[in-house]
Image (cartoon, grey):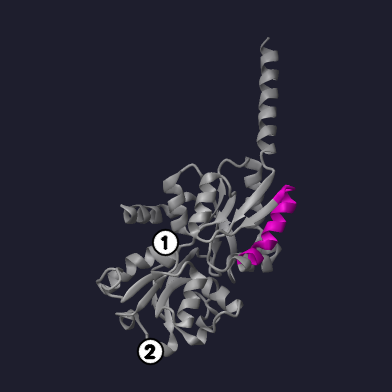
Amino acid sequence: MLKKLLLAATAVATLSFGASAQEITEFRIGVLGGENAQDRLASNECVRAYVQDLLGVETKIFTPADYDGVIQGLLGGSIDMAWLGASAYAKTYLTDPEAVDVVLVKTNLDGSFSYHSIGFARKDSGIASLEGLKGKKFGFGDPNSTSGYLIPSIEIPQATGATMESGDYFGEVVFTGGHEQTIVAVKNGDVDGGVTWADGQGEWVDGYNSGALRKAVDAGLVDMNDLVEIWKSKPIPEGPIVLRRSLPDDVKAKVTKLINELHGNDPECAYNMAAGETAGFAPISHDAYETIIAVRKAKSN
């Protein structure tokens, strides 16, 4: 009798695992807004193709208009994988701690996994510092961006002794919608200065080694000789690649291994995905983001 029960239990477990695996009929990759949707699709197409070949299911890329679209997709189960900023991960975690697993992080050429919020302006504006922006128009990116909002909204007031409210220190404070939008807005003179992200390594003329400025240079959107850096944040932990926790374990393991080895197997694909020159992706855990989570929680209270 005991043997029959054990056999029955084994059969049920096998069927349950099979049913779980069958739930993956497609795989969906969410890409945060930081550049226009067409460029986001192009930059991540190689990753989409690799994942589709690996899993044997249709793999799609989703490019919501804002960061919250990716966050809500992960929370609602309509997106399976995304490379989030630290603040976007913090919001995801604070909303549902069981929604996603942190698996990998982008590393810089020196092995670090930090970056900076970079304040910048047009060189011909004569603005060379935050003081030069006093009374002028300042551009944030997205409310859920770490470098495009969260960190500069804390550190810049510490530097100026004033709030980020329009009319307090800056004449007007606006949201542009994302990193690329901020870069273009500064270039076109729609805002006098703004913030975006970069690893802060390499040369300014290249847009540093990786980040939104590097992507903008590669895309021909901006000549860094026309811009000047006016502020740089303290180091910020690079955001994680996350996978929806309810995915089958074998799917998570396969996709994590693929991305972890991408830099070595296809440097060009890794360059496109990681927004520039990096040392690839490396394992990381939730613990690395506890400080950002605490900052985000305090900011929302």
User: In the rendered structure, which segment of residues is drawn in magenta?
Assistant: 40-58
Dot 1 amino acid type: Pro
Can residue 264 be seen?
A: yes
Quickly name the residue at label 1.
Answer: 143
15 relative position to 145: left or right: right
Picture coordinates of residue 300, whole percent (x, y): 34, 54
Residue sitting at the far top: 1
Can residue 270 be seen?
A: no
Q: Earlier in the sequence, mark 1 or mark 2?
A: 2
Q: Which SS does the magenta portion mostly show? A: helix
Quickly name the residue at label 2.
Answer: 126
Q: Pointer 1: residues within 10 angstroms few (<14), some, or many (20+)?
A: some
- Residue that appears at 63% across and 40% down: 248
Dot 2 amino acid type: Gly
Is 208 located above or below residue 237 in the figure? below
- Residue that appears at 53% across and 54% down: 70
- In front: label 1 or label 2: 1
Q: Check residue 48 for magenta coloring.
A: yes
35 relative position to 163: left or right: right
Q: In the figure, residue 13 lies in which quadrant?
A: top right
Q: Label 1 vs label 2: CA separation?
A: 28 Å
Badges 1 and 2: C-beta atoms under 8 Å apart? Answer: no
